[in-house]
Image (spheres, rainbow, N blue to C red):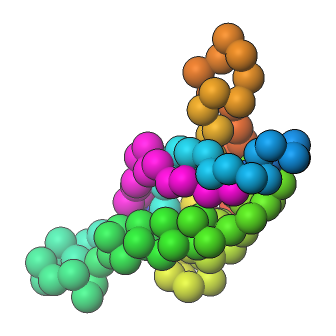
């Protein structure tokens, strides 16, 4: 198993349970590791044979910007669904953090793994 990753993707969205959070946009940060086999892409040197991290990143940005969830848990789960279903990713590890959500802490969030490692 090889890994294609995106680190520290920052996206503004509506996220949170408090009334004031529902009226503003906050930045979330996303790290994403996706299982793939890079050998075909390495041999052909062609993007059609690769897991296209740019396309995945653009789709994830659009999804998060358009979302309106209360919990980071829900947002993480839905992003994982999008990546797995729309890009055929069998396994992923996703870290979603909400900077500044807890005083004294750089960030808080969740780390999830979905699918089967092969």
Kindly report the secondary structure that dominates the magenta region of the rendered protein. Answer: strand
Q: Position of residue 30 (x, y in %)?
A: 53, 49
Q: Position of residue 57 (x, y in %)?
A: 42, 67
Q: Position of residue 14 (x, y in %)?
A: 69, 56
| Quarter of the picture holding the C terminus | bottom right
Task: Provide the residue span drawn in magenta.
Answer: 3-14
Query: 38 or 77, which lies in front?
Result: 77
Callout count: 0
Residue 3 lies in quadrant? bottom left
Question: Horizontally, is 42 left or right of 62 in the view?
Answer: left
Question: Horizontally, is 102 left or right of 91 in the view?
Answer: right
Name the residue rendered at 18%, 72% in the picture. 42
In the figure, 111 relative to 39: above or below? above
Q: Position of residue 37 (x, y in %)?
A: 37, 71
In the figure, 45 relative to 8: above or below? below
- Magenta residue check for 94: no
Query: 17 or 90, which lies in front?
Result: 17
Residue 86 lies in quadrant? bottom right
Residue 45 lies in quadrant? bottom left
In the figure, 106 relative to 114: above or below? above
| Quarter of the picture holding the N terminus | bottom left
Name the residue rendered at 49%, 66% in the picture. 61
């Amino acid at each position: 198993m090889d890994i294609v990753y995106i680190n520290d993707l920052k996206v503004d969205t509506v996220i949170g349970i408090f009334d004031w959070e529902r009226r503003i946009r906050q930045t979330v940060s996303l790290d994403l590791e996706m299982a793939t086999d890079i050998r075909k892409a390495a041999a052909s040197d062609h993007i059609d044979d690769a897991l296209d991290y740019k396309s995945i990143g653009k789709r994830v940005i659009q999804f998060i910007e358009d979302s309106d969830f209360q919990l980071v848990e829900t947002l993480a789960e839905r992003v994982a669904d999008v990546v797995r279903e729309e890009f055929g990713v069998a396994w992923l590890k996703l870290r979603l953090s909400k900077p500044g959500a807890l005083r004294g802490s750089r960030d808080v969030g969740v780390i999830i793994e979905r699918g089967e490692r092969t």
